[in-house]
Image (cartoon, rainbow, N blue to C red):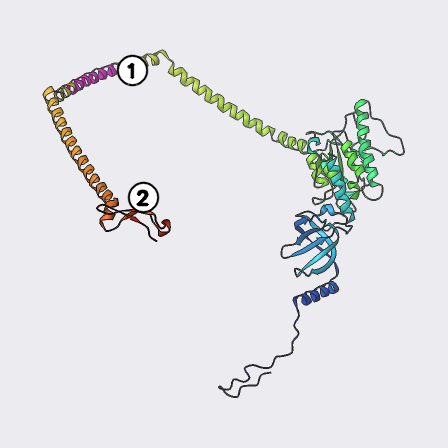
Amino acid sequence: MSRKAQSQWDFGELFPPEQTRRVLTVSELTTTVRKLLEKEVGEIWVTGEVTNLRAQSSGHVYFTLKDADAQLNCVLFRGDATANREFLQDGQKLLLQGSLTVYEPRGQYQLIVRALEPQGVGALQLAFEKLKRKLQAEGLFAQDRKRRLPRYPQRIGLVTSPTGAAIRDVLHVIQRRQPSLEIVLAPCRVQGDGAAAEIAAAIRLLNEWNAAVERQPPVRHDDEAALDCAVLEAGAPTDNRPLDLILLTRGGGSLEALWAFNEEGVARAIFESALPVVSAVGHEIDFTISDFVADLRAATPSAAAELITEGPFASRQFVASAGRRIRQLVRQRIELDRDELLQLTQRLVRVHPRRQLRDKLQYLDDLQNALLRCVRQGWRDQRTRWINLQQRLARLKPALVFAQRKERLAELKRRLHEHFRNGLLQRRNLFAHLQSRLRLLSPDSVLARGYSITTNVATGKVIRAASEVHAGQRLKTKLKSGEVRSVVEG
């Protein structure tokens, strides 16, 4: 340490001895940071959004994983057998597993990716996404194949569990909005092993039942492998009216609980159904494969029942307000008829013979007054025209015109002489200026100042440098007055 100053003039040791310190190179520091990261952090899972994705020709993939406040450089090497590489796209939210390290040449830390999957999604969600892409490629989700629901359904098929909460919600809404709607229930399990097969079988069974009803009286399926069909209303069907649509529904739950509706067999049964299918599985945030394949997706079972009964419910409101609307239309019609009667009465008064005669007499008086006005106006116009002609004749007297033309001729003559004099003066000035310039540029003016021009007698070429002549050469020198001939001696 430096010595303390004893007074204001004692500054202590200005140059203290160098203290002992450890100095690292950049490479050593970077290596130390890398070892610390690999030791303390190591293998981790991290989630974020992919951006700046670029695939090199070498097969390695580089990208950045970011969130709202930070970003992380990532690399996926070609030799790593990483599944779900197709999810690696800009803007995709992913869950990555890898080892955190430092890329020493650039001094930046990065994640070497070993595994990836969509954010917050496990094996079931991966299977869901793969099946979704497969069926979408086959056209099962195409909008042009979606069918519109009948506006006034009379009988529907219901595929759900007879003991679940969904069926109670559906029945409650239908009882409140359209009590006359008949429901044919195809009971099935909606959760657990084998539930998907039962759901697909129930959809096909309802289609078969509907086809049989359209051909002949209802046929009961006694096969033990077939599902039992029942009508949830008062007794059995009163006629052989076919089904209008099929409602596939169940209450909310986890992804595992709803997985039966994500099976390919259920999706293809919905796609092959001859009847329109409404899918109402889970809550508003739940989406299943059956929702994408169905002709209509409802957020909840209650919402599905409201959509199905929308036509009759709206019509019920229309019928309830029909009486008031009819009375309003009758009053409007009476008012219109009263107005029309009043107009006809007024029109009859206007077409009465006495009224027409009075109108004609008044019109005749108007014509008479107009005729008198026209005569007086015509006389005034003719008088004004005569006065104007007199004034024009006075202005066009020959003596006056001759005097004006004579003055005009004199003015033009004066202007012509003036223009000629000005032009001649300009030409003289220009000539004198050019003559002066020519005199200044003339060789005679140069010779008059004491200069001379020497040329080769044989060729007439002007000599400008001593190197252009040689001994014995004959020269001619032109002066202001006369010429001098000479021979070069050296």
Q: Quadrant of the N terminus?
A: bottom right
Q: Which residues lie in the magenta part?
A: 364-388
Residue 312: image location, x then y, percent: 67, 31
Left or right placement of residue 157 versus residue 109 in this view = right
| Frontmost residue, 233 versus 405 | 405
- Disc 1 marks which residue? 362
Vertical arrangement, residue 143 with respect to residue 99, above or below: above
Would residue 53 be visible to someone looking at this image?
yes
Q: Residues within 10 Å of mark 2 (few under 14, many from 20)?
A: some
**Based on the displayed image, in which of its 4 quarters is residue 30 positioned?**
bottom right
Query: Is 225 colored magenta in this rendering?
Result: no
| Frontmost residue, 321 versus 290 | 290
Residue at point 71%, 30% (across, down):
153
Vertical arrangement, residue 434 with respect to residue 61, above or below: above
Residue 294: image tag? none
| Frontmost residue, 231 versus 6 | 6
- Disc 2 marks which residue? 457
